[in-house]
Image (cartoon, helix red, strand yellow):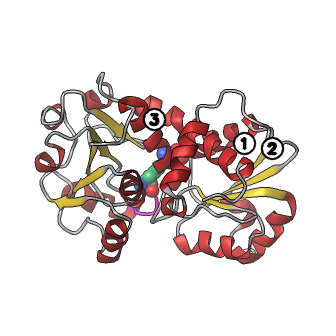
Amino acid sequence: MPNHLLEIDDLSSAAITKIIELSKVEDPDQVLQNKGAALLFEKPSNRTRNSMEMAIIQLGGHPITIRPDEVGIGERESAEDVARTLSCYHALIGARVFAHSTVEKLAGASTVPVVNMLSDTSHPLQALADLLTIWEEFGTFEGCAVAYVGDANNVARSLAMACGLMGIEFRIAHPDGYGFSKSDEEAIRGIGTLLSTTHSPSEAVAEANVVYTDVWASMGQEKERVKRLADFEGYTVEDKLFELTNEDSIFMHCLPAHPGEEVSRSVLDSSRSRIWGQAENRMHAARGFLLHLFQEGNQK
Ligand code: CP
Ligand code: NVA
């Protein structure tokens, strides 16, 4: 059955459209009845853990969350042996990891689907919830432009790819040295994303429909925090910047947020902010994805 989701472009645009539809199903088939789902975490989580656990329960399944000290991927035993073992008990393995190669190793050995619940390079489940949020807001992806202000991190990379898959323009404004790598940029453009990069937040957000940001120091980058706070000065999403967008534009953030750093409290709390609907959509999008995976077989 394996049909892993390691990055958002493991799904076609047709599959994403279907997942968005399935996210809305109110009485879903119990496709995980009497089945287990192992959720492995090398890093902390609030939204991902809770939304995945609840989505699995809503489909009749039983999630088992595994903390870093309990399994020790690559320490107590290899990623491959962890995956082989968990495949014996579970219909699904979710993993939040540091190195993206860890989810690749898990997927290489697992006999059940492996879902990337965030790696240092990618956050595909977040991107699905982001697309669902944009769809709910505008009812279309056509003519939509997302302006991401900040670090070209895991969330930005998956979002840029997701935008490309669905025909959304993606702009990023970042300080020098914090953009996509050349190979990431090629991969993003390679799937058809209309991508533009700039060092000017005001240029990026001009007449955008969505302004998106994320933390300046991601999990695992704590030692760089002080340097990053200095390097990102001038990249805070504030009311003044937001005023340059379209009049029906919205603000999005994957959360957790650091108010006063990447975004002001005022923008987070404004009537244009969709952060709580977006957080709720993590559960609906995860359920839609799992329904697609287990109900629709191996359709991509
Ligand atoms: N957005 C997101 O993935 O949140 P958590 O890190 O709390 O799971
Ligand atoms: N870029 C952030 C996202 C958290 C959901 C991180 O990796 O820490």
Q: Earlier in the sequence, mark 2 or mark 3?
A: 2
Q: Which residue is drawn at 29% across and 76% down?
A: 182
Q: Where is residue 148 in the image (x, y as percent from the top left)?
A: 27, 49
Question: Is ligand 1 within 8 Å of the beta carbon of the residue shown at mark 1?
Answer: no
Q: Badge 1: few (under 14), some or many (20 or more) residues near its Cα, within 10 Å? A: many
Query: Which element carries disc 1, helix, strand or loop?
Result: helix
As for residue 150 lying within the magenta part, the answer is no
Task: Tell me what residue is drawn at x 27 percent, y 51 percent.
Answer: 169
The range drawn in magenta is 218-222
Amino acid type shown at disc 2: His
User: Decide: marks 2, 1 in contact (CB < 8 A)?
Assistant: yes
Residue 154 position by quadrant? bottom left
Q: What residue type is labelled 1?
A: Ile
Q: Dividing the picture into quarters, in which one does residue 241 lie?
A: top left
Checking the image for residue 8, the label placed there is none
Position of residue 112 in the picture relative to residue 74 (left or right) = right
Q: How many marks?
A: 3
Q: Which of 269 and 91 is in front in this view?
A: 91
Amino acid carrying mark 3 in the image: Gln
* Residue that numbered label 3 is attached to: 278
Find out whether residue 221 is within the magenta segment. Answer: yes
